[in-house]
Image (spheres, grey):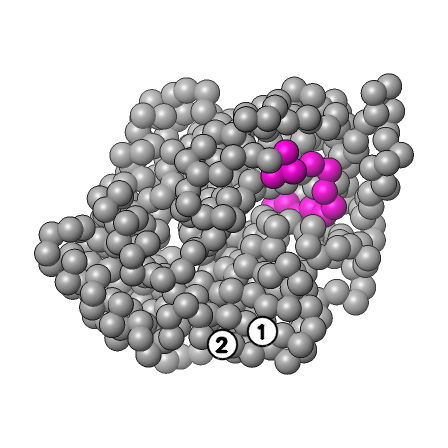
Amino acid sequence: MTVPVLPRLRARTLEAPPQPDLFDLLPPDVDPATVVSWVREGDGLIGWGRAAASTDDGMPSGPDRFTAAAQWWADLVEATDVVDEVNLPGTGLVAFGSFAFSPDSPDLGGLVVPRVVAGQRDGRAWVTSIEALDDAGQVSTQAGRSHTGATTVASGQGELADGIRLEPGAVAPEDWPRVIRRAIGRIEAGEVDKVVLARDVRAVADSPIDTVALLRRLAARYAATWTFAVDGLVGATPEMLVRLQEGRVRSRVLAGTVRRGGTPAPSVTEAHPELEDQHTPDPRLHLVSAAKELEEHAFAVRSVAEKLAPHCESLEVPEQPFVLELPDVYHLATDLSGRAADDATSLDLAAALHPSAAVCGTPFADAARLIDELEGMDRGRYAGPVGWLDASGDGDWGIALRCGQLAADALSMRLFAGGGIVSASDPDAELAETEVKLAAMRHALGLGS
C-alpha cells in the first residue's frame, strides 16, 4: 500500500458566544457538500470546508477500512500543531467520519477534517480554525482562506429543493413483504436467529437538494436524536453506537419499534438523558412489549454487550429497557455504560461494535450473507458508523439510520429504512414499519408532516 503524504495542519480553538442555533454560523456562501454536523438538542458540532480527508490518500476499503482510517488519524494528529484554549471534548483537532456498512461496498467512507468547526455544550461554545501549513510552518497560500463564521448568519440557506418526488428503489414497496417472507423461511429453517433487512427509496429533485435545509428541518423536529451530515450522508439517528469521553464508555441500543397512536405527534418530544443517567422503569413499556419486539431487542443488547466487554473494566447492562419517544415512533431502548479498560479510541470501539445485531442480525456472518442475498442493493454508508473523534480519541459514533445519501450532483437522494426480522415477524407490518421510519427524511425533504 502506498504510504500517504499527510498535510501539516494548525488547529486553533477559541471561546465563542453560545448560539441559539449552531446552523446560523454557516457562512452564506458555504459549499453544502462540505457541511458536517453532529447536533442534539442544540448542542454538538458543525463544520464546513475541507482541510484533509483520509480518502484523499487512497485508503483501503474492505475489512481494513477502520484500521487504515485510525492509523491515518493518529499520524495526522502527530503532524498537527494545536492551540486549544477551551479543552473540552470536541475542541482542538476534530474529524468527522462515516463508514460503509459492508466491507464490500464501493462507498467505503472515511474521515474528514473541516476547515472550521463550531461547537457548544453545557453553556460553553467555541470555534476551531484548521489551516494547512507550508514547509516553513506558515499558513499555506495554496490552501485558500477559510471562513471563521463565528458571527456570520447564513442568510438564504434552508431552502427546500424544487419538484421533489419519490421513486421506488431496488425493491418496490409492494414486493417487500415477499422479501420478508423469504427471510422468515430462512429463520425457521435455522439459518439465522435474526436478520435486519433494509429497503431504499429514491428522492429526485428539479434543483439541488441543500444539506443545510435538511439539517435544519431534522434538528427542529427530531431534537432528541443526533442530527448528522458527513460527505452527503444526512440524517437524524436515535441510536448511539458508542460514546467515549474521559474514560467512560456508553452505548444506546434501539431495537423494537411501534408506530405512535393516532393522536398528532409533538413537533419536539420529551428531552432524553444523553446517556448520562440510569433510567427508571418506564410505565409505557406495554406499548412496545410484544414478543417480537422484546426478542429483537434482547438480541441487539446482547451483541453490543459482548463486543464492548473486552474493552471495559465493568459494564452495566440494565435489566429492563426504557421507551424512547420520537415524533413518529416509540423504540425500546437500553443504555449500557462502563469504564474503559484499554487505550482504544472511540473509532476503535465503533469498529469493534460494527455491525451490531440491531442493523445486521445474529449470528453475524450468516445474517450478513442473507442481507447480501435478499436486499438486492448496496447499503453504502447506511447503517454504518457515523460521528466524530478528537485528537485524544474521545468522540461520539452513532449508527447511520433515518438518513439519506445525496448523489454527487445533489439532484437525487437515496433514502433508507429497515427492520429486524425474527420468526414472529409479520411481512405486512414490516413494510409499514419501514414507511414510518422513512417519515423523518420525507419530512426533511418537505414531503410530509
Q: Write the start and end of the magenta stretch as one range.
A: 44-57
Residue matched to label 1: 204
Residue at 69% x, 50% y: name it: 34
Residue 447: quadrant of the picture: bottom right
- Residue 57 in the image: state x and y as whole percent: 63, 34
What element does badge 1 sit on? strand
Residue at 50% x, 60% y: name it: 403
The mark that comes first in sequence, 1 or 2, is 2
Q: For the view shown, which residue lies furthest in the left direction? A: 189
Count of labels shown?
A: 2
The residue nearer to you, when weighing 316 against 371, is 371
Q: For the view shown, which residue lies furthest in the front direction? A: 1
| Residue 54 within the segment the image draws in magenta | yes
Q: Within 10 angstroms of label 1, few (less than 14), some, or many (20 or more) residues?
A: many
Q: For the view shown, which residue lies furthest in the right direction? A: 141
Left or right side of 294 for 406: right
Residue at 44% x, 78% y: name it: 264
- Residue 389 in the image: state x and y as whole percent: 57, 35
What element does badge 2 sit on? strand
Q: Amino acid at mark 1?
A: Val
| Residue 25 within the segment the image draws in magenta | no
Asked if residue 124 can be seen in this view, the reply is no
Residue at 34% x, 69% y: name it: 433
Residue matched to label 2: 167
Mark 1 in CB contact with mark 2 (< 8 angstroms): yes
Q: CA distance from mark 1 to mark 2?
A: 7 Å
Q: Quadrant of the N terminus?
A: top right
Residue 153: quadrant of the picture: bottom right
